Image (cartoon, helix red, strand yellow):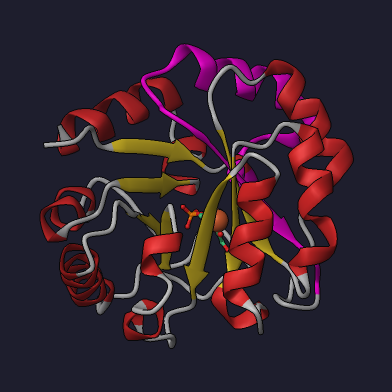
Amino acid sequence: MSKKIIAPSLLASDFANLQREIEMVNQSDADWFHLDVMDGVFVPNISFGMPVIQAIAQHAKKPLDTHLMIVDPDRYIKTFGDLGVDHLTVHYEACPHLHRTLQAIKAEGMKAGVAINPHTSVKLLEDTIQDIDIVIVMSVNPGFGGQSFIDNTYQKVADLKQIIKRKNAKTLIEIDGGVNADNAKKLIDHGADVLVAGSFVFKSSNPTQTIKKLKEEIA
Ligand SMILES: O=C(CO)[C@@H](O)[C@H](O)COP(=O)(O)O
Ligand SMILES: [Fe+2]
């Protein structure tokens, strides 16, 4: 069985001590950094953008998994590539020419991801799945950390796993939103490969230990 991945979301970290938070993730059992970019249009919130990611990239020693919650993401693909981002995920709902967008991301040397909102069926990815490196199944409505996990995610993960198998694709399934020690193992059992965790990690009293426990939970 392939290695399961934990990606702490810096959205829930202490921005006033960002370097310290990055070092914590560097030293921890976490595998990736998850970076949430929000534009205040696609989602009703604004997080951080290029200058902050540039600063993060200077200190982070693990892959940068970047989740764009923005309209018209094609405008910035080259910029994110130049910043050294490793994975660039766009929203299905924001891309009228998804196949073209995926090719453009790969042409800049990044892994190409597609995120789907809770109301978006995994069936809509059938025709592009072989071109997608990562699918982020949103288990909350995007825009904010600290929300409650939506239960029908389990079924979506199982259905998506079937599509990936049937199409002989190598796509990773990533779950984003409300992930904690209570749902982590069940998500993996349904077919997830990557779990994003924001509040559960950074709002805990010992984030390093929390990451370690999550990793043990899904091992
Ligand atoms: O993309 C998003 C929210 O839109 C996520 O990446 C959150 O940052 C996850 O935070 P928690 O739900 O784990 O607190
Ligand atoms: Fe995210």
Where residue 109 appears, as percent x and y from the top left, is: 64, 39
Residue, far top: 27
Query: Is residue 132 in view from this perspective?
Result: yes
* Left or right relative to 207: residue 102: right
Residue 177, position as x, y percentages in the image: 44, 60
Residue found 81% across the figure and 48% down from its top:
78
Query: Is residue 206 visible from the viewing direction of this image?
Result: no
Residue in front for this viewpoint, 190 or 183: 190
Residues 134 and 20: in front is 134
Q: Is residue 59 above or below residue 71?
A: above
User: Which of the image's four quarters has the N terminus?
Assistant: top left
Question: Magenta segment: does it hold 22?
Answer: yes
User: Magenta segment range?
Assistant: 11-40
Residue shown at 17% from the left, 57% from the top: 191
In the displayed structure image, the side of residue 196 where residue 47 appears, left or right: right
Side of 173 relative to 53 (left or right): left
Q: Residue 102 lies in what quarter of the image? A: bottom right
Up-down relation of residue 37 to residue 69 (above or below): above
The number of discs equals: 0
Q: In this orientation, which residue lies closer to the viewer: 102 or 113?
A: 102
